[in-house]
Image (cartoon, grey):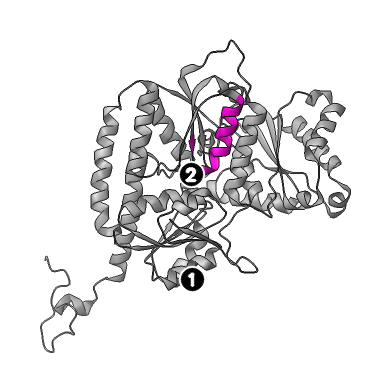
Amino acid sequence: MATVTLSKKACAVNPLKMSQPIGGALAFMGLRGAMPLLHGSQGCTSFGLVLFVRHFKEAIPLQTTAMSEVATVLGGLENVEQAILNIYNRTKPEIIGICSTGVTETKGDDVEGYIRLTRAKYPVLANFPIVYVSTPDFKDAFQDGWGKTVARMVEVLVEEPGALSRRDPNRINVLPGCHLTPGDLDALRTIIEDFGLTASFLPDLAGSLDGHIPDEFTPTTIGGIGVDEVATMGEASWTLAVGEQMRRAAEAMTAKTGIPYRLFDRLCGLAPNDDLMMFLSEISGRPVPRKYRRQRGQLVDAMLDGHFHIGGRRLAIGAEPDLLFDIAGMLHEMGAHVVAAVTTTQSPVLERVATDTVLIGDLEDLEALARQHDCDLLITHSHGRQAAERLGIPFFRMGLPMFDRLGAGHLVSVGYQGTRDLIFDIANLVIADGEQHHEPTPDTWRTGNAAPVAGAPPAHPHPCC
């Protein structure tokens, strides 16, 4: 069992953590025709907008109530009202999702009250979907904002099933954590459909941020799950939640609809995917398709091959709690040692991470721990690249943001295939680093590590020729 400690520094240096509001905003982007709205200053929104654009390389819908110093002191009713009206009239969204920020939470704005007053003043908005989530950025972190937002979506948008309504035995709800990419969601959807089941993902970033080109421009999200489909999620037979951060949303779904849920802490690795396959086989009444039996064999073979390069390595990992638990667990099963683990916020899974200590801190802490424990592989998002360079160790990018590589949204780590490919990517990085640091020189071509023998004839630099 890992011991969880909190950094005592007065400030964050090279932050690992991202804030709640942008976690909530990203969750709203998994709804079709949505416009996320941050209730705060323009700077709060612009920083989040830049982060998402650099990561996904896509147009990102994100608006702000543009609170000034005076508006913040006097209250944001007028700003919230005008923002809702402008968005409704100009962008024609299907839903507006509002996340609070630190400045308006400190003031104590009653946003739910503002929404009620706005609906009463403008009858056209009386039944228009508007979801508000309290996400102050002076506490918690990215995955907390995501989890709270999805839970709030369930509470507001999902309709309670009627007394005569019947559940569809072939339909399930999926509540994915923020550590899953659009590529992960596509892979998970394929697995579920191969068991003859239909899945409703909330949120569904695979529909909105998977990098496809729309037929025509729209200022809102260009895909994702529709509000009408969310409303009918109470007709499903099961809810599948991925990541501890989704427990609150899964419990909200059960409380409102009576649907049982199954929480998977992780879906990267052999045993977690065995559990997933058995669960889907059980609820569908179908045997595991033959192709997944073959993929399982491929993963076992990949684990054997990758063990020679990953096993015994000393790893430093910095990530949100669910991603940390997911990746650290898989690499621990490969024989690696996670000796430096840094995360962003409290979570029940941290005590189960395969390491001695998990520190809630920043990338400076991760770099110091990696140097102290003589780590030979660093795993975190793109802001860890300078630390890896100073440490002189290979760097594997995981998490958000990943702005210095293409295809961040299409990386897959779930399922047998996703785990297999992740093992290959990490092992190949280690192999390439070893080749880079052991490149033969003209001297070693002749006599290995010894200096050239005086008067010896020059040998051809390639031994096979």
Q: Give left or right: position of 138 versus 144.
A: right
> Residue at 75% of width from left, 23% of height from top?
127
Q: Which residues are magenta?
A: 241-256
Q: Position of residue 418 (x, y in %)?
A: 36, 42
Q: Which residue is mark 1?
A: 368
Three-letter amino acid code at disc 1? Answer: Ala
Q: Give left or right: position of 196 versus 158.
A: left
Q: Which is nearer the eye, 342 or 252?
A: 252
Q: Position of residue 211 (x, y in %)?
A: 51, 39
| Residue 132 position by quadrant | top right
Q: Position of residue 71 (x, y in %)?
A: 86, 49
Name the mark on residue 399.
none
| Residue 279 position by quadrant | top left
Q: Main secondary structure of the magenta part?
A: helix
Residue at the extreme bottom of the image, as rendered: 454
Q: Which residue is mark 2?
A: 409
